[in-house]
Amino acid sequence: MYKILLIEDDTSLFQEIKERLKQWSYEVYGIHDFSQVMQGFAQVNPDLTIIDIQLPMFDGFHWCRMIRDHSNVPIVFLSSRDHPTDMVMSMNLGADDFVQKPFHLDVLVAKIQAILRRVYHYSTEESELKTWLEATVDKERNRVTNEVGAIELTKNEIIILSMLIERKNRIVTRDELINRLWDDQRFVSDNTLTVNVNRLRKKLAEIGLGGAIETKVGQGYMALEKL
């Protein structure tokens, strides 16, 4: 049974979403003190987090940043605002999807199911360790280690890296990566994938692998077999 943390200050909407998710056997938890969101997050230790952008005290973007400092848990944003920058910012902060209010609850459930299936089933099916450039890539723990050190990756980053490694020295197109990462591409700008790849590169640079992913302009990316 998956645990979902719903960070939503509209009590009627919270209860509506909670009741529908309970029908699908999800455990749903909320936040009572919006100045203590991270404490609530730590207590629940959810499998997926849903965050409204407009919240008391601090907005959802703030809490997304805080969560990303500690966890790679999938994040879905809810928002009544329809400005494209909100959608782009959500993805750039590492969110997995963006749902604009008003929405049909069945759509939200379908998105949640798709994310959980993609993130956790992918991890189960692809849990073996991989060796790449004398580094160990642990797809189950979202971790890359070598003699220099270790880095922790988000779910999106480990999926990108895994796809590239599986096809070393061959180009993986941007469309292939976007299709694998995001079910609903309406909210994915061309820059969103670039941001994810650049973030992955920065982390790889921490263990001496900063130049291990090449950009093929107008095509996609390629993981090198040798440095």
Image (cartoon, rainbow, N blue to C red):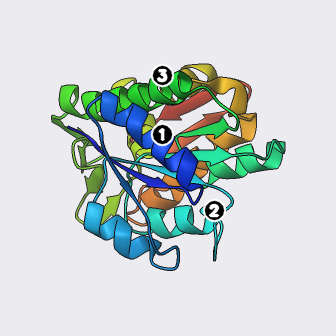
Q: Residue 76, percent across and down?
A: 53, 44
Direction front: furthest residue: 12
Dot 1 and dot 2 residues touching (CB under 8 Å): no
What residue is pinned by disc 1? Answer: 17
Compare marks 1 and 2 and give the one earlier in the sequence. 1
Q: Residue at x 31, y 47 (%)?
A: 47
Dot 3 and dot 2 residues touching (CB under 8 Å): no
Amino acid residing under circle 1 = Ile
What residue is pinned by disc 2? Answer: 61
Q: Residues within 10 Å of mark 1 (few under 14, many from 20)?
A: some
Q: Residue at x 70, y 34 (%)?
A: 102
- Viewer-nearest of discs 3 and 1: 1
Looking at the picture, does residue 7 appear above or below residue 133? below
Q: Residues within 10 Å of mark 2 (few under 14, many from 20)?
A: many
Q: Is residue 36 left or right of residue 83?
A: left
Please, what secondary structure does the residue beneath circle 2 have?
A: helix
How far apart marks 3 and 2 lie (CA) works out to 36 Å
Please, what secondary structure does the residue beneath circle 3 have?
A: loop
What residue is pinned by disc 3? Answer: 170
